[in-house]
Image: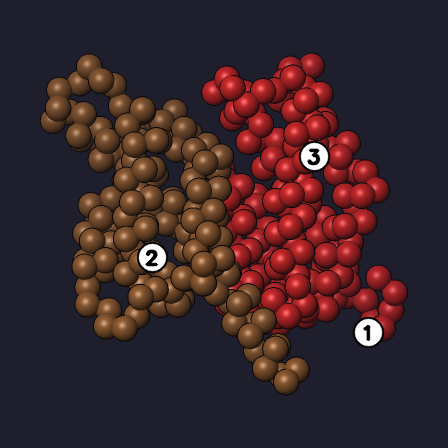
Amino acid sequence: MNTRLKMLHEVALVADGPAFTSRARELGGLAATALGEKHRSQITGLESLANSTLKVSDVFDYLKLRTARHKEWRESELGQQLLQYLEQDLAQEREQICLRLGLSDEAPEQREQRQEVYRALIRAFVQQLAAHYEYALALPEGASQ
Amino acid sequence: MNLTPEQQARTQLLSDEALYKEACKFIRDHAEKQSLPDARQFMGLLQFSRTWKELQEYINHQSERDWGSNQTCPEFYNALCGRLRELQARYVEPLVSKTLSKKERQAAMDCWADALMPAFIQHLYAEGRYHVALKEQNRAQRRNHV
């Protein structure tokens, strides 16, 4: 298996793990409660940015600005919690994956691959969060999420 | 002079690995010292950061402006001016070949700075707005408790 395939395989394993999926469910549910249907575009905007950007910091900047501009993101702590998870927990997951794949932060090519692992983790998380958000919105009010 | 796709990838990596952290640290240091300007100042910075030259002119103008009794803004802009010079020396200068003529070297540095400095300001803007908004929310919550 070449390095890129190994990277995607490792990311897929993490994204299928219980800690990752349960956090995506929690934050997707929190997003549904805080933003409702009215602010759906903010979640689709996040998903589309995560899918298209070449920089993980673009995603962090997007979340900070949503949190600064919209009280729904701040008061529910959706913005703070999501930022913390992506910036800290997923950064640790990235380190573990890179350690397993032997990707150091010294060689320029490997640094780009490390960045790609991080981008893929964030993309997978946002994708799951968006799915849980939509699902939670579709459930009748008060139904278990 | 334009950056090649490989050079653009390098700026993206630098933005993620170094400039983002530098911007967050700069804002957090100022937040600790209670010396963050309000949201309007961050919007101004973002607006005038399309090129390195424009950004330098704007920050120089802001740091030399008469702010009256406001000590926060001149301190912030002076510190930012110093930090941008450090970033230039740490991240931009090493990217440019020393074998170029003085004029070519300057043109190459301006080209890299045009790509990197707006990225730094974008991170600074987001972190600054985030901090200011959370601070205002905390203040409002404390007021409501009293």
Nearest to viewer (mark 3 / mark 2): 2
Compared across the picture, whether B42 is left or right of A10 comes to left
Q: Among the chains, which one is red?
A: A
Look at 59% across and 56% down and name the residue there. A44
Chain at tag 1: A
The numbered dot on residue A93 is: 3
The numbered dot on residue A141 is: 1
Figure quadrant of the N terminus of chain B = top left
Same subunit: marks 2 and 1: no
Could you tell me residue B77's position as x and y percent?
29, 56
- Quarter-wise, where is residue B10 in the image? top left
Residue at disc 1, secondary structure: loop
Nearest to viewer (mark 2 / mark 1): 2
What crowding class fits label 1: few (fewer than 14 Cα within 10 Å), some (14-19), or many (20 or more)? few
Residue at disc 3, secondary structure: helix
The numbered dot on residue B125 is: none
- Amino acid tagged 3: Glu
* Whole-number angstrom distance, CA of label 3 to CA of label 2: 36 Å
- Amino acid tagged 1: Glu
Above or below for A85 versus B128: above
Colour seen for chain B: brown
What crowding class fits label 3: few (fewer than 14 Cα within 10 Å), some (14-19), or many (20 or more)? some
Could you tell me residue A63's position as x and y percent?
55, 55
Could you tell me residue B115's position as x and y percent?
32, 38
- Quarter-wise, where is residue A94 in the image? top right
* Whole-number angstrom distance, CA of label 2 to CA of label 1: 48 Å
User: Is residue A53 or residue B83 the one in the foreground?
Assistant: B83
The numbered dot on residue B76 is: 2
